[in-house]
Amino acid sequence: MLNQVPTSQWRRKPVIEAINEINGSISKIQSQWDLYTQAILREIIKDPLTRKKVISFLDTPMSEKLPEAFIDVLSTPNERISRLKARFSQNISYYLSLDAVPDDAISPDISNAPLLCNP
């Protein structure tokens, strides 16, 4: 009987699937993030200004907007990172600019997280 209930009309489409339809695959976004992090690591090693900007993020609270803010701040004076930002503006930049999911819309489900279950 429950198999006959059309639940798809009540379920929200996952954001990740929507991104795949609009801007390509998650693997593409992951590879772009890898390129960002590698470039940032190289700049941290060689450029004192980049190191100073990264240090300013040490006490920044975690949020969904932190990666986007991090890229924005580092790309301002740094030509290499700003080129990557321009190059990836249609994919990872769109993903990073998504609004956060409200806490009340997240329902915790520990059935798929066995390490969080207490027997």
Image: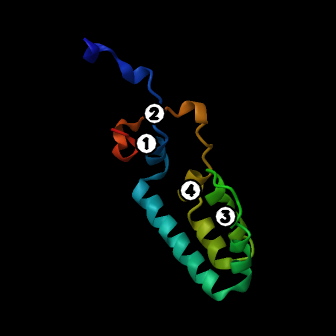
Question: Quarter-wise, where is residue 110 in the image?
Answer: top left
Identify which residue, 102 or 28, lies in the foreground.
102
- What's the residue type where badge 2 is placed? Lys
Identify which residue, 2 or 58, lies in the foreground.
58
- What's the residue type where badge 4 is placed? Gln
Q: Mark 3 points at which residue?
A: 70
Instruction: From the viewer's perspective, tell me whether residue 44 is left or right of residue 106.
Output: right
**Crowdedness near tag 3: few (<14), some (14–19) or many (≥20) residues, C-alpha within 10 Å:** some
Residue at 43% across, 60% down: 28
Distance of label 3 from label 4 (alpha carbons)? 18 Å
Q: Residue furthest bottom?
A: 46
- Give the number of the mark in front: 1 or 3: 3
Residue contact between numbered discs 2 and 1, judged by CB atoms under 8 Å: yes
Mark 3 or mark 4, earlier in chain: 3
Residue at 68% across, 67% down: 58
Task: Give coordinates of residue 105: x percent, y percent.
Answer: 55, 31
- Give the number of the mark in front: 4 or 1: 1
Q: Mark 4 points at which residue?
A: 90
